[in-house]
Amino acid sequence: MEESAAPRFDCQSCGACCSYSSEWPRFSTEDDAQLDLIPQKYVAADESGMRCDGVRCSALAGEVGKSTACGIYEVRPDVCRACMPGGDDCLMARKAHGLPTL
């Protein structure tokens, strides 16, 4: 069986997408029931998305590029679920952090 040529990235040793832009973790397709599951301390004051400390999502724990974890992984917003390891958004965020993209 041939191995895929696509790069493989481990989100738990990266976290770049969660520390890329305060504009990225925006709520867009979630319904009220989904949003109600996210602890209020992680929601932006205007309730448009996740609260960020600078460009870093407040739910991100750990050091980007070393070891990270999402504090609300099971209830994370759809925009977070849509960012796939090795996808365009992932690679853009990794590049911004100086992390390997291949």
Image (spheres, helix red, strand yellow):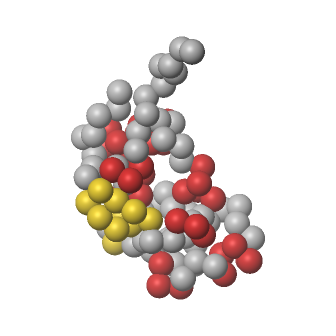
Camera-nearest residue between 100 and 24: 100
> Vertical placement of 39 versus 75: above or below?
below
Q: Quadrant of residue 52?
A: bottom left
> Vertical placement of 87 versus 4: above or below?
below
* Left or right, 67 with reference to 93: left
Residue at 44% x, 65% y is 70
- For the N terminus, the image quarter is top right
Residue at 29% x, 34% y is 100
x%, y% of residue 40? 53, 85
Q: Is residue 22 visible?
A: yes
> Vertical placement of 63 versus 48: above or below?
above
x%, y% of residue 9? 41, 39
Q: Quadrant of residue 53?
A: bottom left
Residue at 63% x, 79% y is 37
x%, y% of residue 24? 49, 57
Q: Quadrant of residue 58?
A: bottom left
Residue at 52% x, 65% y is 73
